[in-house]
Amino acid sequence: MNPNGPTDFVSQLCLNCGLCCNGVLFADVELRKGDDPQQLAELGLGLGRKGRRLAFAQPCACFDGKLCKIYSQRPKRCRTFECGLLKRVQAGQLDAGMALKLIGQAKRQVQKVSKLLRRSGSDDERLALSHRYDQAMRKPVDLSAGNIATALPGKLMSAYGDLMRRLQRDFLK
């Protein structure tokens, strides 16, 4: 805790993370009652149908890698989402420094998965990580390509599984 007053955990953690906006935690975000689809589209969100609801794909077109360019006008789901790490820090169950370490570990695991995805040919970073993973795992394995190429899907599956367990444990609970 900051001895000079309360710590702004949102800015401290969220500005170092971005996993909820960059396509790692979510593949899309559904609009909620009260969101203005026309205004959000004008602000740069590419809206499409997801069943009966409107949604926008992740990574978010309004996320610059650190900040939301439409923060004051962001959709309701974005305004109300708090990850598990943030909730635990706010409740005093986890130290902010440890939360930052967990964010760093998750981001390093994302980098590992992303590197394997690029090696597998799934390099379109405009897609959510889960979509890139699905794309890579659907590709047939060329058994004549040698041990390195045939081992890649297994390495990717293992790294992605590790990442998903970490995200579930630290961010989505």
Image: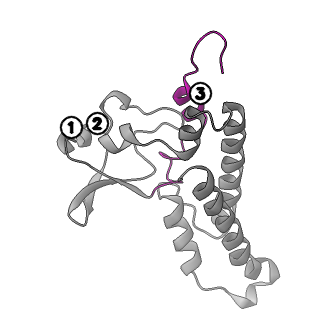
How many angstroms separate mark 2 from mark 1 (CA)?
6 Å
Mark identifier at residue 43? 2
Give percent across and percent down for residue 59: 46, 50
* Front-most of residues 149 and 20: 20
Tell me the kind of residue under disc 1: Gln
The amino acid type found where label 2 is placed reads: Leu
Distance from Cα at disc 3 to Cα at disc 1: 29 Å
Circle 1 Cα neighbour tier, 10 Å, few/some/many (<14 / 14–19 / ≥20) = few
Residue at 70%, 54% (x, y): give it.
Answer: 109
Q: Nearer the viewer, residue 3 or 15?
A: 3
Report whether 145 appears left or right of 120: right
Q: Secondary structure at mark 1?
A: helix
Q: Residues within 10 Å of mark 3 (few under 14, many from 20)?
A: some
Mark 2 secondary-structure assignment:
loop
Q: Is residue 30 above or below residue 42?
A: below
Query: Is the C-beta separation of discs 3 and 1 under 8 Å?
Result: no
Rate crowding at label 2 as few (under 14), some (14 to 19) or many (20 or more) other CA atoms within 10 Å.
some
Q: Could you give the CA–CA distance between mark 2 and mark 3, rounded to whole angstroms?
A: 26 Å
Which residue is located at x 68 percent, y 77 percent? 153
The spot of residue 62 in percent (x, y) is: 40, 39
- Regarding mark 3 in the picture, which secondary structure is present there? helix
How many marks the image carries: the answer is 3
Mark with earlier residue (2, 3): 3
Q: Residue furthest right?
A: 147
Q: Earlier in the sequence, mark 3 or mark 1?
A: 3
Q: Which residues are magenta?
A: 1-26
Q: Which residue is mark 3?
A: 12
Q: What amino acid type is highlighted by mark number 3? A: Gln
Please state the horizontal and vertical placement of residue 111, each as a whole percent of the image.
68, 53
Say if mark 2 contacts mark 1, CB within 8 Å.
yes
